[in-house]
Image (tube, helix red, strand yellow):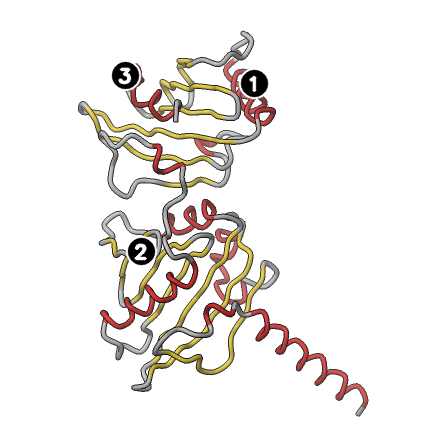
Amino acid sequence: MKKLIVCMLLITLTIGVKAQDYPQKFNNIAGWSIEGEKQFYSRDNLYDYINGASDFYLGYAFQDLWVVDYKNSAGQMLTLELYRHGSALQAFGIYTEERPKSAKLEPIGAQGFVESGAVFFLADDYYVKVYNSRPEVPETDFVDFAKLVAGSICESCGLPEQFTWFPKEGKVKLSEQYLAENFMGLTGFNGVSASAYELNGETFRLFVLLDDDDKCRSIMESYFKRLKYKKKLKEKTYSFDDPYLGKVLIAYKAGKITGLIDAKAPEQHEELLLKLHNK
């Protein structure tokens, strides 16, 4: 009997902590009330909810997830999924991995889209999904609900600053990505922001990596070693024939590495690289 009481007490305390921890800003979504129990997932048990995809989310510094049902006065219900990541860049990374290239953007949070009766959007360090799993809520209503949720996270949400630096000329729409690790298959190129371009009959990518200078120097020196390039690192733009990546332009200055890959004649686009590098 004593063991049963202790177990019940622990369960009650656990539920209480979860309820208390649910961010207050999501408790008062105008026109909607929380229905049923809230579900909480941490890094330790995310696989219980999304199983095969959990490692993918963890790779983008996943912190926690709340899954909560909301009901309006008409008795209609929506399911809200709040994925919180370690930074806005990490949230942007997982969001863009799941965003279709053909997505029709909606002005929700920093960026959002509607797909198959659901809303997906980015707001600060949250990647948010709203499911109209019971197709009874009109699209305008569940999009408005998503906007209310986004507004409770940030009043004027924007994309991570790095993505405002990329030159607009030739940039492919919805090609921006944040790659958490091993960009280009290279060890050390972690936390890279990149975008695709189409210009003068060529398709190529620009990328930028920001870190403390010791880390940037180490990354560049490791890349030099891989290419058997023995000169001392300087703040300049380098041109390499990489045996795996082809022609590469890569620029270094304190705390910043910028590059251009996939072009047959990268020198023709060096001006774009320098615009990004000098931001």
Note whether 264 is above or below 77 in the view shown.
Answer: above
SS for callout 2: strand
Residue 269 image point, x, y percent: 28, 19
For label 3, the crowd category at 10 Å Cα-Cα, with few meaning under 14, some 14 to 19 and many 20 or more, is some
Horizontal arrangement in the rendering, residue 254 relative to residue 10 (left or right): left
Q: Residue at (29%, 30%) from the top-left corner?
A: 167
Q: Residue at (40%, 13%) from the top-left corner?
A: 239
For label 1, the crowd category at 10 Å Cα-Cα, with few meaning under 14, some 14 to 19 and many 20 or more, is some
Q: Which mark is residue 265?
A: 3
Residue 91 image point, x, y percent: 45, 50
Single out the mark in the foreground, 2 or 3.
2
Q: Quadrant of the N terminus?
A: bottom right
Single out the mark in the foreground, 2 or 1.
2
Q: Amino acid at mark 1?
A: Glu
Q: Residue furthest bottom?
A: 1
Residue that label 1 marks: 221
Q: Residue at (18%, 23%) from the top-left corner?
A: 200
Q: Residue at (28%, 43%) from the top-left corner?
A: 174
Nearer to me, 60 or 144: 144
- Which numbered disc, 2 or 1, marks the residue that appears first in the sequence? 2
Q: Quadrant of residue 133?
A: bottom left
Residue 102 image point, x, y percent: 23, 50
Q: Residue furthest top?
A: 231
Residue that label 2 marks: 112
- Give yes or no for contact between labels 2 and 1 (Cβ–Cβ under 8 Å): no
